[in-house]
Amino acid sequence: MCQRPDRPVPRRSSTLRPVTPETILLVEDERDIAFPLGRTLEREGYDVAWVDNGREAFDVVDDGPVAVVILDLSLPDMDGLDVCRALRADGYTGGIMMLTGRAGELDIVVGLDCGADDYLLKPFGLAELCLTNKEFGVLRVLFSQRGKVVPRSRIMSEVWDENWYGSTKTLDVTIGRLRAKLEEARLPDRIVAVRGVGFRLEQAVDAY
């Protein structure tokens, strides 16, 4: 188990918005990637906190609820894989997506074994990471129960509203968009429908 390294009082690089329960933490030291990606996610309605090193990432997670960490593996102070291991060892249960230029099969497997949920290979288009609020909510629920079937009723209750009176077909439309974006981004996961029950997020058989 990787222990979190000792660290001095941190310097917060930049927080684009205050940390909220739906915050996306972007851990990326390349400003040419971090700025446009952060702004794009903000335009999609997300709260984005940005830091440029691994040590400050721990502090943001400690300070408040973070739903998803988008984590570059090549950081100036420590390897992103060590950050991922330490976050999981500290009990972080949110989603972790790796940004990596390491396209080798072994590197990807190691990253997923360290606790990452998904990976995205550099270079990538900003559209590949952009989800609507509802898409993000559905993906967050499925991530939290990765490998298990999540009932339609639970997804509707947590993402829309327990008193939602509209058609549940809106969930099917959202799932359809998510599937397309996961495939476009070449992520190793797929959303499987379990007839009459709900949906399950699982690793595609041919992911590698």
Image: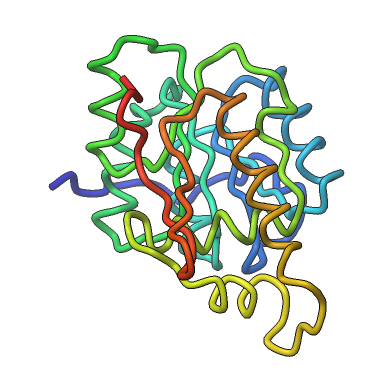
Task: Please name whichever residue, 205 or 111, is drawn nearer the observer in this view of the structure.
Answer: 205
From this view, report whether residue 83 is shown above or below residue 73.
below
Residue 140 position within the rendered picture, expressed as x and y whole percent measured from the top left: 54, 58
Along the line of sight, which residue is nearer the eye, 203 or 88?
A: 203
Farthest residue to the bottom: give it.
Answer: 163
Q: How many marks can you see?
A: 0
Corner quadrant of residue 153? bottom right
Residue 184 image-quadrant placement: top right
> In the picture shown, does residue 129 fall above or below 138?
above
- Measured as percent of width and height from the top left, residue 40 is found at 80, 35
- Where residue 154 sits: x, y (%)? 54, 77
Q: Residue at x 41, y 25 (%)?
A: 73
Identify which residue is drawn at 48% across, 29% down. 187
- Specify how the rendered protein is coloured: rainbow
Question: Along the horizontal axis of the image, is 1 left or right of 193?
Answer: left
Rendering quarter of residue 139: bottom right
Q: Which residue corresponds to the image point at 70% horizontal and 53% vertical from the top-left?
A: 174
Q: In the drawing, does residue 164 fall left or right of residue 135?
A: right
Q: Position of residue 43 (x, y in %)?
A: 86, 44
Residue found 33% across the figure and 62% down from its top:
148
Compared to 127, does 175 lie above or below? below
Residue furthest toward the left? 1
Among all residues in the image, which is located at the extreme front?
195
120 left or right, relative to 73: right
Q: Assign the C terminus to one quadrant of the image.
A: top left
